[in-house]
Each structure stands twice: as structure tokens, then as C-alpha cells.
Image (cartoon, rainbow, N blue to C red):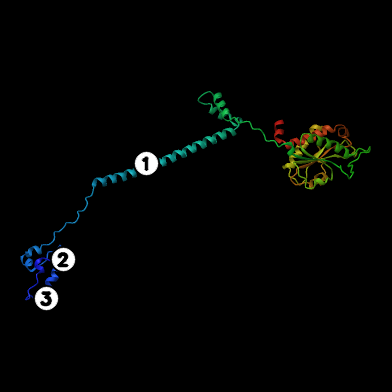
Amino acid sequence: MSPEEQTPPDEETPASVIWMEMMRREAAKRQPTLPVMTETSQQSEPLERLETPPPQVDPDPLPTVDEAALEVQRQRRLERRRKKRRQKRGSILSGIVFSWLIVIISAGLIATILSWSTSPESLSDSLRAQLGQGGSSSQGVSMVLAMTEQPTLTPVVTPNHLIRIGILAGHSGPENDPGAVCPDGLTEAEINFAVAERVWRYLLDRGYDVDLLEEYDSRLADYRADLLVSIHANDCRDYGEYVSGYLVSQHDMRPDDGADGRLMACMVRHYGEASGLSYRPQGVTPDMLEYHVFNRININTPAVIVELGFMKDDREVLTTQPDRLAEGIINGIMCFLYPSLEGEAE
């Protein structure tokens, strides 16, 4: 407090005035930044100064738009769009080119394959003449022949040990069935076995899987093989005339154009050539057409029965030439197994 403030008030000053003065002073201490409003200052302070409003502050101005930057961005967007269009056109073009390449390559491969599979002999004379136009005719034909020349192909041949053959000696076996018997004791069974044994031995020596079967062999039940040949001979009766020749038959229930028919055709041809005997198809009997072995073997096994000749009038060839007869049987078997080689021989 200042010295004036410490001076005790006049006794004539009322207590309420003193108290109010003290309160104003206390308030002035708490707000030092504001001037203490005394009665004197209130009278001397101009009224206009107290009523002057605070200065107005302008708000922040709006940022200006950069037109140059916007133009740059717009140009960039346009460039990206042009680039995408160019890439799309390029991919479409490359796809078309690739498709054409595939077509051209495929056409070349097809033409090459067709040229390999076309025989030179299949070209007509007129076509050769047309191909030879524009130059030498012989030169044009030679070019076509060179283009269509076929590569040499090695035929696939089944190994011998994988080919199974059944050779049946008629009337052989434990039943001691001689078959037909001549007055001097010559039996059909011994003629049949002599030929069958030679065929079996020949095939066996060349590596074939070959079975020498008896008339009622237990192995005949559902017998499976590439072929079966049953060898027999005709009877020794006197027919009152010269009766000679051989017979071949398949099962009457098998188709003529099937495997059995092919085996029969091969046997007829080659056995006749080797034996020198004539073929007698009219002499085939129902017993041959319904031969019991045909009904026992597997249905997929081609089979024939061969009557080598008549034991009376063909006796000499049957008893003295078993090798020739075996050769005819063997050639008939080879004809059936290798038809392509048979065609070349012709």
C-alpha cells in the first residue's frame, strides 16, 4: 500500500465508503492489465476512447487456382488414354498375325503328310502333264514324284514265340483208334501222324509255340490259338473207279469271309501246289462240316480239317511223300499268318 493508503481515514468518512474503496483496490490488484477505474479517471477519460470498437481482421483470402497445373494434369490424362488405345490396337494386330501363322504352319504340315501318303503311281498322265507346264514336262513330273515319295516302312511282324499253333494228328491218342484201315493193314492214324509230326517239328524248330494234339486231347477244351489244323486221310474203299484228291473244310457255322475262310483258302491253294493232288470240294461230308473239334475249341480260334488224299488211289504219295504233304500244310499256315508276304509273292 502507498503511504496515502496507509493513512487512517478521517473519522468523518463513513465505514461503507471505506469498505467499497478497499474492494475496488483488491479487484484492481487481481486485474493488473486493466486500469483502475477511480472516480477521477472516470471523469478525465474521454467517453469516445472507451467506446472505440476493436479493429476488424479480414479473413484469409481464398487460394488462387493454378490454371497451368490443371492443364498439365489434363494433358497427362489424355496421353495415358492414347497409350492404352495404341496398346489395344497392337494386341489385336499381333493376335491376327499369330492366327495367320498358325493357319499357314498347319496347312504346311497337312500338305507334307498328304504328300507322304500319296503314291506316285496314283498321279494320272493328264495331271502329270499339267504339273509339267511352264517348263520341262519330265522335270515337273520328277519334282512331283520326289515330293510324294513315300518313306520305307518296316512291317511289324509278331515274334514267332508269340504265335500259337495247334497241329492235330487225326485218330491219335490212347483210344487206339486207327481210323480208316486198308486190307493190308495200312491205317489212317499212321499216315496222319507222319505228316502232323513233320509239320510240328518244322514249326517248333523255328520258334513257334506249337502243340501236337491228339484226337480227343483234353487241351482242346476252349483251346485258344492263332490257328488249328486237324490232319486226316480219306478211306481205303474201292469205289469202282479212280478216286483221288484232297478235301479241306471249316465249320459250317463260321462265315466264309472270316478268319476260318482265309485259313481254308490258303490251305486249299498251297497244299494242292505241294502235293500235286486235285481239290475235291464236292467230296466234303457232313462229318467234316460238323467235326467235333470245331465245337470244342474257343470260338475265336480259326480251324480247318484237311483230308490228305484217298488211301487207295493216292496211296503212293501218302506213304512215300510225307515231306511234300507236310510242306503243303506249312505253306498254307504261313499264307494265313503273313498275308502281306503272300501278296508280294503273287
Tell me the kind of residue under disc 3. Answer: Ser
Q: Residue furthest left?
A: 44
The answer to whether the residues at label 2 and label 3 have Cβ atoms under 8 Å apart is no
SS for callout 3: helix
The residue closer to the viewer here, 316 or 21, is 21
Coordinates of residue 328 in the picture (x, y in percent): 80, 34
Q: In terms of image quadrants, where is residue 316?
A: top right
Q: Quadrant of the C terminus?
A: top right
How crowded pointer 2 is (Cα within 10 Å; few <14, some 14-19, many 20+) is rated as few
Q: Which residue is mark 1?
A: 86
Q: Between label 2 and label 1, give the one nearer the viewer.
A: 2
Q: Between label 1 and label 3, give the one nearer the viewer.
A: 3
Tell which circle, 2 or 1, labels the residue nearer the N-terminal end: 2
| Residue 271 visible in rendering | no
Q: Which residue is mark 3?
A: 16
Tell me the kind of residue under disc 2. Answer: Lys
Tell me the kind of residue under disc 1. Answer: Arg
Coordinates of residue 205 in the picture (x, y in percent): 79, 34
How crowded pointer 3 is (Cα within 10 Å; few <14, some 14-19, many 20+) is rated as few
The residue closer to the viewer here, 335 or 252, is 335
Tell which circle, 1 or 3, labels the residue nearer the N-terminal end: 3
Coordinates of residue 179 in the picture (x, y in percent): 88, 42
**Residue in view at x 47 percent, y 37 percent:** 101
Q: Which residue is mark 2?
A: 29
- What is the C-alpha distance between the residues marked 2 and 3? 20 Å
**Residue in view at x 31 percent, y 44 percent:** 76
